[in-house]
Image: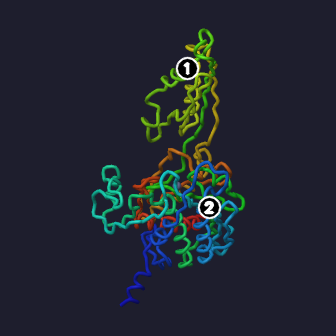
């Protein structure tokens, strides 16, 4: 009985575009089981550190993944001095040089915002609808109202944390899915694919890991970060981002003898803040609409300053926002002529679409792969930056793919068995599509 059952379990079905189905041998370990193993390893990164990785504990997962990659037949497996895991999965075509080397990247660290220590993953088997109350802190509730996606997960096995930590689906889902793809390819040599480059990075959440990425050594022509959310969501667009610093220079003196001498910069900064249009702020915008966001500052008689984020998907929109901030400086300066006001604007990153528009096949192949996995793919611009945006401008065009996860960076994070499996299946289709089209 057991052996018959096992051999049935050994076959999974992957639908392909022409309506046929291939019988595939299952991976040696499911995406779900891998995921549950990885989330137990605390890999929280930390802000404002001088080292990469920012926390040594990220190396625990890096070293484990390097070992597992070797066991899965990957080649040239190495952990760099910065804790980045690199590997190559050899192609199995007669002439691999005809297919571009495609990279797959996920990050190992979890957000500094919420603890990732002693993650106790809970599997809500055969979910039958309704809100999900997390058992160790019952004030933590994943509601259907705020998570309409739950309505599509009836019958699925949903994975959450217990209410005291984040889950780490961001981005251990991506890690587990890439590892399971490699496993499936090894179990099924009939799946034809070119050479794949694999990387798992530390410190994505604090923005520093990718600075140490060896684009040349990675050896891919294109890559995908597997770090998105809802099934089917593909992103080839991020913000273009700038930061402005406005400085208000006054003059301080002893208040007892200040008459006619003191120039209090605080009133000028107050006036400037009052000029921000209320419909152009993070709290009043969504979708493709950009914003300006005063987020930190110093208030002082002698010298006050304000730091402001500018975000927009279009450079022209970003230019308009910068001009507005400069015009506001002129208006405040006219009202406070004794205060010296200066504005300095720096570029942070650019919308990767500016480069990716020249490589439409990357998005198209991903859409096709998701369709073959039975999903409805859609494009979603990211209201933020990704590691891929940086890589894209360093010569490695890198859109972002979904992982099936939701509610990143918080205790209400979740993914599901189907989320992990369908994301993995999409990756398997994607490598085949690159081989077919070359
Ligand atoms: Zn992430």
Residue drawn at 33 percent across, 54 percent down: 141
Residue drawn at 59 percent across, 60 percent down: 105
Q: Is residue 265 left or right of residue 213?
A: left
Mark nearer the N terminus (1 vs 2): 2
To which residue does mark 1 refer? 268
Closer-to-camera residue (163/69): 163
Which image quadrant: the C terminus?
Answer: bottom right
Q: Is residue 36 left or right of residue 217?
A: left
Residue drawn at 49 percent across, 54 percent down: 234
What is the residue that sits farthest to the front in this orientation? 256
**Which quadrant would residue 140 be assigned to in this image?**
bottom left
Residue 427, above or below 411: below
Asked which secondary structure carries label 1, the reply is helix
Q: Position of residue 165 (x, y in %)?
A: 44, 58
To which residue does mark 2 refer? 56
Q: Position of residue 159 (x, y in %)?
A: 39, 64
How crowded pointer 2 is (Cα within 10 Å; few <14, some 14-19, many 20+) is rated as few
Task: Count how many numbered circles sit on residues in the image.
Answer: 2
Closer-to-camera residue (388/353): 388
């Amino acid at each position: 009985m057991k052996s018959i059952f096992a051999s049935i379990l050994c076959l999974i079905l992957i639908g392909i575009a022409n309506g046929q189905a291939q019988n595939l041998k299952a991976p040696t370990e499911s995406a779900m089981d891998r995921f549950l193993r990885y989330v137990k390893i605390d890999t929280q990164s930390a802000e404002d550190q001088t080292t990469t990785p920012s926390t040594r504990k990220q190396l625990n997962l890096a070293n484990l993944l390097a070992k597992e990659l070797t066991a899965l037949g990957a080649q040239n497996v190495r952990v760099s001095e910065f804790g980045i895991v690199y590997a190559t999965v050899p192609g199995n075509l007669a002439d691999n040089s005809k297919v571009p080397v495609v990279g797959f990247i996920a990050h190992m660290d979890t957000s500094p915002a919420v603890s990732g220590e002693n993650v106790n993953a809970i599997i809500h088997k055969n979910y039958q609808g309704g809100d999900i109350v997390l058992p160790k802190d019952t004030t933590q509730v994943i509601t259907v109202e705020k998570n309409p996606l739950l309505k599509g997960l009836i019958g699925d096995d949903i994975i959450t944390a217990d209410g005291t930590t984040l889950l780490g689906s961001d981005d251990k889902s991506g890690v587990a899915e890439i590892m399971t793809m490699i496993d499936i390819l090894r179990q099924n040599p009939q799946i034809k694919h070119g050479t794949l480059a694999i990387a798992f990075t530390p410190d994505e959440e604090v923005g520093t890991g990718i600075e140490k990425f060896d684009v040349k050594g990675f050896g891919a022509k294109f890559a995908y970060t597997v770090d998105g959310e809802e099934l089917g969501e593909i992103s080839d667009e991020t913000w273009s981002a700038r930061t402005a610093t406005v400085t208000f220079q006054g003059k301080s003196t002893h208040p007892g003898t200040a008459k006619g001498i003191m120039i209090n910069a605080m009133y000028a900064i107050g006036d400037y803040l009052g000029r921000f249009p209320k419909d152009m702020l993070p709290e009043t915008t969504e979708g493709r609409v950009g914003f300006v966001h005063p987020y930190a500052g110093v208030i002082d008689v002698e010298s006050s300053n304000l730091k402001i984020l500018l975000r927009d998907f279009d450079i022209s929109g970003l230019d308009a926002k910068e001009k507005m901030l400069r015009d506001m400086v002129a208006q405040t300066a006219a009202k406070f002529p004794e205060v010296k006001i200066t504005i300095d604007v720096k570029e942070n990153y650019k919308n990767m679409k500016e480069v990716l528009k020249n490589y439409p096949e990357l998005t198209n192949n991903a859409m096709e792969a998701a369709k073959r996995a039975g999903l409805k793919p859609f494009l979603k611009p990211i209201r933020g930056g990704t590691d891929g945006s940086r890589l894209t401008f360093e010569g490695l065009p890198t859109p972002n793919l979904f992982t099936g996860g939701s509610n990143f960076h918080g205790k209400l994070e979740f993914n599901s068995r189907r989320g992990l499996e369908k994301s993995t299946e999409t990756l398997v289709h994607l490598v085949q599509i690159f081989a077919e089209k070359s």
